[in-house]
Image: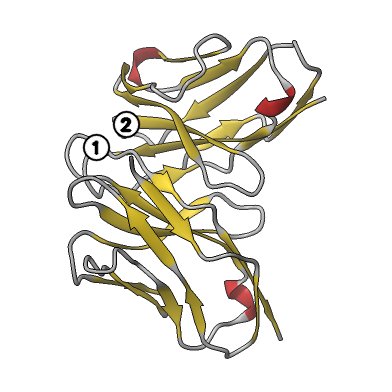
Amino acid sequence: GNSVTQMEGPVTLSEEAFLTINCTYTATGYPSLFWYVQYPGEGLQLLLKATKADDKGSNKGFEATYRKETTSFHLEKGSVQVSDSAVYFCALIAGGTSYGKLTFGQGTILTVHP
Amino acid sequence: EAGVAQSPRYKIIEKRQSVAFWCNPISGHATLYWYQQILGQGPKLLIQFQNNGVVDDSQLPKDRFSAERLKGVDSTLKIQPAKLEDSAVYLCASSLLGQGATEAFFGQGTRLTVV
């Protein structure tokens, strides 16, 4: 079946530190890959996405590259801010007749200190 | 543009009671999803509607959970009777089309506590 595995958390960083959150997946067909973010008290929001191998998704200084050979979609940011503190979810939509169903990882809590 | 609206935001009930959640998707979105998010886990799809028809309800515990989407717009999710393990956040999402990489927009969720 389809599954997403995220790195163990939580992650605590100082402001301006480099961020990596690992994500690997197992899926049928050629999935589309996503990172969603959940800020405190808010709903899930799409952060970035990539729909085919070697695509790079980017938004708000965050980047992730679709690596088919390693079945990975790691999230990176060069310099985090306190406002980036949130829960980050890696997710996929499997290829074929998945009708847009998202399969999520377990989430990674990020806390950024001043 | 208004987002996905859900109510109530919080609900506390005793086990074996019933509860209902309501969702109003973004106007014009044909696809509506209900996800269950247990603390410390990622959201899991319970049911997906395309207009007012069910596309996927394979993960819905049909002995106690039911959902409907009247006239292809608003939706309600019901649990009857509730169990302790149903304590979770119930998320509603909608998208223009339930295909491929279409972005899903999420509501703030309903946090259910079963005691």
Q: Quadrant of residue A80?
A: bottom right
Given the image, what chain letter belongs to the residue carrying mark 1? B
Residue B97, labelled with which disc? 1
Given the image, what chain letter belongs to the residue carrying mark 2? B
Can you see residue B1? Answer: no
| In this view, A65 is above or below A14 | above
Tell me residue A70's x, y (percent). Answer: 28, 68
Have a look at marks 2 and 1 and say if they share a chain.
yes
| In this view, A45 is above or below A28 | below
Find disc 2 in the rendering and name its residue: B31
Q: Quadrant of residue A16?
A: bottom right
How busy is the neighbourhood of tag 2: few (under 14 within 10 Å), some, or many (20 plus)? Answer: many
Structural distance between the alpha carbons of marks 2 and 1: 6 Å
Q: Residue at x 39, y 71 (%)?
A: A74
| In this view, B68 is above or below A74 | above
Q: Residue at x 71, y 86 (%)?
A: A114
Q: Residue at x 39, y 53 (%)?
A: A91
Q: From the image, which quarter does the N terminus of chain A lie in? A: top left
Residue B107, labelled with which disc? none
Q: Is residue A106 left or right of residue A33?
A: right
Q: Amino acid at mark 2?
A: Thr
Q: How many marks?
A: 2
Q: Is residue A13 left or right of residue A100?
A: right
Q: Amino acid at mark 1?
A: Leu
